[in-house]
Image (cartoon, rainbow, N blue to C red):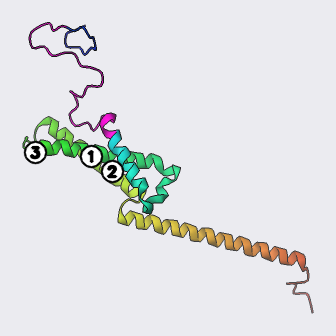
């Protein structure tokens, strides 16, 4: 094993003066912005999901079918937040640095993903209005179908109980 290989060996002795100890499990020394780290992303995402589900106006998101998209949106928002914070701390650095450029690209992808999912979930005013309209139209169509079914059922029952009713042969 190389002296630079991370190892949780407790009796570690440096090979030369100034050598740092091996990485311990769960270390964060190599984390730059954390946008790819579940340890950083998941708690932020969970907080977003919890706050979103606590909003009574968004009660439709409690349906099981929304949960994967809700979680994907929250993860994208959390990644965007972490990248934004990372880049804000580097505001004095040159934008041309490879690390900053890569982070800006990742930020753009995370923001785009989050915006698309926000729209799909009805989390913007316009998308919520469209979703509400679609839901209302669906309910209206369901109600019309139910009324038609009830009317047809009533007509069948009426013909069965009064066979002479509705015949045009009475003369």
Q: Label 1: how many residues lie within 10 Å, few (<14), some (14-19) or many (20+)?
A: many
Q: Which mark is residue 91?
A: 3
For the record, the magenta segment spans 13-41
Mark 1 or 2, nearer chain start? 1
Q: Is residue 109 visible?
A: no
Q: Is residue 110 left or right of residue 157?
A: left
Q: Nearer the viewer, residue 73 or 113?
A: 73
* Residue 145 occupies quadrant: bottom right
Q: Could you tell me which residue is drawn at 15 percent across and 16 percent down?
A: 20
Our reading of the magenta stretch's main secondary structure is loop
Q: Earlier in the sequence, mark 3 or mark 2?
A: 3
Q: Is residue 136 above or below residue 98?
A: below
Q: Is residue 112 left or right of residue 165?
A: left
Neighbours of disc 2 within 10 Å: few (<14), some (14-19), many (20+): many
Q: Position of residue 22 (x, y in %)?
A: 22, 16
Which residue is tagged 1? 80
Task: Give the label on residue 26, or none.
Answer: none
* Spatial separation of the CA atoms under disc 1 and disc 3: 16 Å
Check whether the beta carbons of the residues at disc 1 and disc 3 lie within 8 A of each other.
no
* Picture residue at 36% right of the left edge, 65% below the top: 125
């Amino acid at each position: 094993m190389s002296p630079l290989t991370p190892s949780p060996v407790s009796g570690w002795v440096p090979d030369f003066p100034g050598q740092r100890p091996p990485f311990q499990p769960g270390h964060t020394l190599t984390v730059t912005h954390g946008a790819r780290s579940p340890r950083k992303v998941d708690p932020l995402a969970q907080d977003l999901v919890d706050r979103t589900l606590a909003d009574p106006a968004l009660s439709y998101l409690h349906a099981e079918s929304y949960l994967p998209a809700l979680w994907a949106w929250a993860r994208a928002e959390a990644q965007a937040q972490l990248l934004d914070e990372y880049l804000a701390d580097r505001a004095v650095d040159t934008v041309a640095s490879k690390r900053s450029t890569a982070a800006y690209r990742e930020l753009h992808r995370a923001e785009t993903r989050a915006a698309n999912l926000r729209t799909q979930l009805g989390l913007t005013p316009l998308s919520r209005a469209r979703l509400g309209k679609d839901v209302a139209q669906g309910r209206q169509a369901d109600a019309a179908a139910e009324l038609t079914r009830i009317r047809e059922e009533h007509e069948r029952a009426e013909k069965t109980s009064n066979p002479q009713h509705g015949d045009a042969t009475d003369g």
